Amino acid sequence: MAQKLGYVALVVRDYDEALAFYTQSLGFQLIEDTHLGDGKRWVLVRPPGPGGTDLLLARAANPEQTSRIGNQTGGRVFLFLHTDDFWRDYREMTTRGVKFCRPPSEESYGTVAVFEDLYGNKWDLLQLKSS
């Protein structure tokens, strides 16, 4: 049996502001932006490179969902963005205005820094050490 995560839903306030952040600030690729009617859209973005899991930008549809924007995991790191060149991506993201809330550090498993998306969700930028 073969399985993989296809999409991870991220609750956002607005499709266009989220799309701009993920494509311009993080350099993700727009995979799909389909209008579904009644203001709903199916918006998928993906980090550059082969394979990977798509991020579904899902606009909050009610007050409960709106309350989760920016804190989908209770303040813990939500997603882990793996890279093949930590310092290249760290410098590019910093230049594009991405806010890092924990500076780079060398850990036993690799080089890592924590950044926040436009809503405050925490992410790891991570280059794993070679085995």
Image: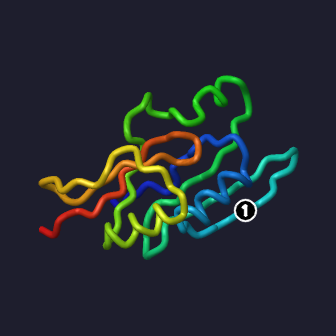
Nearer to the camera, 98 or 27? 98
Q: Is 35 displayed left or right of 13 in the figure?
A: right
Q: Say which residue appears at 23% left-offset and 62% top-offset.
A: 128
Q: Is mark 1 on a helix, strand or loop?
A: strand
Instruction: Answer above or below: position of 114 versus 51.
Output: above
Q: In which quarter of the image is residue 3?
A: bottom left
User: What residue does disc 1 label?
Assistant: 33
Q: For the N terminus, give its image quadrant.
A: bottom left
The image shows residue 30 at horizontal and vertical percentages of: 63, 67
Instruction: Answer above or below: position of 113 versus 45.
Output: above
Q: Quadrant of residue 70?
A: top right
The image shows residue 62 at horizontal and vertical percentages of: 73, 28
Instruction: Answer above or below: position of 65 versus 15.
Output: above
Q: What residue type is labelled 1?
A: Asp
Q: For the C terminus, give its image quadrant.
A: bottom left
Q: How many numbered tags mark residues here?
A: 1
